Image (cartoon, rainbow, N blue to C red):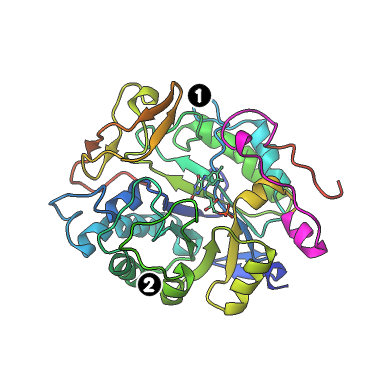
């Protein structure tokens, strides 16, 4: 916050540390941070409590990816685990949950249900819901019409289209993201995606 | 279009309902400091209702990949100030995504130190992109049973 940010988001998705505590494929602890669903969830909840007391709940959010297996995340019971986590998060006062759906490129384990994450989990969430993964203009608009998610987040589309809202407004064509320049390198594929009208 | 409608989020008033999600771009320097190129990159995207930064390492220990930015040294914080100023001066809103990679790292790029994770269980079925090419994941060390330093 000292750096002038308007808020913070805890990265609890994509197989990183908070996500690792939730998954049996990374957490076999026998202390109060492993084993039962409440124990596996303790780490994420404690970090959120700390963030809320450090910067104020109205400036805090969290990103979760319940059915996304990236980083070798396999939960014995993903629905019960995330249902518990969300119920506990609902007791905390903070701004938003960014709900990342699984991607077709990363199939989840066979014991995972086929449910849509926004319908299943989004409807339980008390905070504002930001829906994420693979949305385009039409599917994003349809998702907002459904009324569960309040906002939509776009990754690759914003990467390739600095003026994405304007392009949606005008029904303009979109630049296509270039995979080769996503990670590392210089200005090419970073700051040189063209604007519609400069 | 609902996407273009303004919306309140916490204490923030967003000009539309479109969020730029966090994307690691690995363009910081070796000390985790972002440069002018990154200021320009975020500045260009201020028309998003909300920008969420690329994941930012909260400590040296939290770091899993080379050239990802941090926010634990004064130099790193000062560099981010330039980003947030450019975004604010141009009507944008930006929040920081806080990152601890846990087992998703490699000792090659961690001064020889193994990553730390909930349990000593390596990632299977994936490799890590290191400064010396793709490597199998190592078995991480186990984090001690105290409250963590993730803030
Ligand atoms: C190059 C790249 C880097 C990413 N880095 C992060 C990251 O640092 N933190 C994060 O939470 N998600 C990260 N993601 C995931 C995106 O935020 C987003 O969840 C994902 O791309 C799905 O949204 P999309 O289909 O609109 O791109 C990254 C995605 C891409 C393409």
Query: What's the mark number on residue B30?
Result: 1
Mark 1 and mark 2: span between their CA atoms?
Answer: 39 Å
Name the side, left or right, on which B12 lies relative to A123. right
Q: Chain of mark 2?
A: A
Q: State whether label 2 is within 8 Å of ligand 1.
A: no
| Residue interval drawn in magenta | A164-189
Q: Position of residue B13 (x, y in %)?
A: 64, 66
Direction left: furthest residue: A30
Question: Which residue is drawn at the image coordinates 47% and 28% (left, top)?
Answer: B66
Residue A31 colored in magenta in the image = no
Location of residue B19 (image quadrant): bottom right
Location of residue B1 (image quadrant): bottom right
The local secondary structure at tag 1 comes to loop
Q: Position of residue A23 (x, y in %)?
A: 28, 54
The local secondary structure at tag 2 comes to loop
Q: Chain of mark 1?
A: B
Q: How many neighbours does mark 1 have within 10 angstroms: few (below 14), some (14-19), or many (20 or more)?
A: few
Residue A125 seen anywhere in this rendered image of the structure = no
Query: What's the mark number on residue B13?
Result: none
Name the side, left or right, on which A118 lies relative to B93. left
Residue A137 seen anywhere in this rendered image of the structure = yes
Query: What's the mark number on residue A90?
Result: 2
Secondary structure, magenta segment, majority class: loop
- Taking depth in this image into account, of B115 and B9 the one nearest to the observer is B115
Q: How many neighbours does mark 2 have within 10 angstroms: few (below 14), some (14-19), or many (20 or more)?
A: some
Location of residue A32 (image quadrant): bottom left
């Amino acid at each position: 916050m000292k750096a002038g940010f308007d808020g913070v988001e805890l990265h609890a998705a994509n197989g990183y540390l908070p996500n690792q505590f939730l998954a049996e494929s990374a957490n076999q602890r026998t202390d109060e941070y492993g084993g039962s669903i409440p124990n596996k969830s303790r780490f994420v909840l404690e970090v959120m409590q700390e963030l809320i007391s450090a910067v104020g709940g109205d400036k805090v959010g969290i990103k979760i990816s319940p059915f996304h297996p990236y980083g070798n995340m396999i939960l014995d019971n993903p629905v019960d685990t995330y249902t518990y986590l969300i119920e506990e998060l609902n007791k905390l006062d903070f701004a938003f949950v960014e709900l990342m759906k699984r991607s077709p490129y990363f199939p989840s384990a066979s014991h995972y249900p086929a449910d849509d994450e926004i319908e299943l989990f989004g409807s339980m969430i008390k905070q504002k819901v930001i829906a994420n993964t693979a949305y385009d203009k039409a599917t994003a608009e349809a998702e907002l019409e459904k009324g569960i998610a309040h906002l939509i987040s776009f990754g690759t589309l914003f990467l390739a289209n600095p003026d994405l809202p304007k392009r949606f407004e005008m029904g303009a064509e979109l630049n296509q993201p270039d995979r080769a320049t996503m990670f590392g390198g210089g200005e090419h594929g970073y700051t040189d995606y063209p604007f519609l009208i400069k | 279009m609902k996407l273009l409608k303004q919306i309140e989020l916490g204490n923030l008033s967003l000009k539309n309902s479109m969020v730029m999600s966090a994307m690691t771009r690995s363009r910081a320097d070796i000390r985790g400091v972002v440069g002018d190129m990154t200021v320009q990159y975020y500045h260009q995207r201020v028309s998003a209702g909300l920008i969420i930064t690329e994941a930012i390492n909260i400590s040296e220990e939290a770091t899993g990949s080379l050239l990802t930015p941090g926010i634990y040294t004064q130099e790193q914080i000062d560099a981010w100030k330039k980003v947030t100023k450019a975004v604010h001066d141009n009507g944008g809103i930006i929040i920081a995504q806080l990152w601890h990679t846990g087992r998703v790292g490699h000792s090659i790029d961690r001064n020889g130190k193994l990553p730390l994770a909930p349990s000593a269980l390596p990632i299977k079925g994936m490799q890590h992109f290191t400064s010396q090419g793709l490597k199998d994941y190592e078995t991480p060390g186990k984090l001690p049973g105290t409250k963590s330093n993730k803030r």
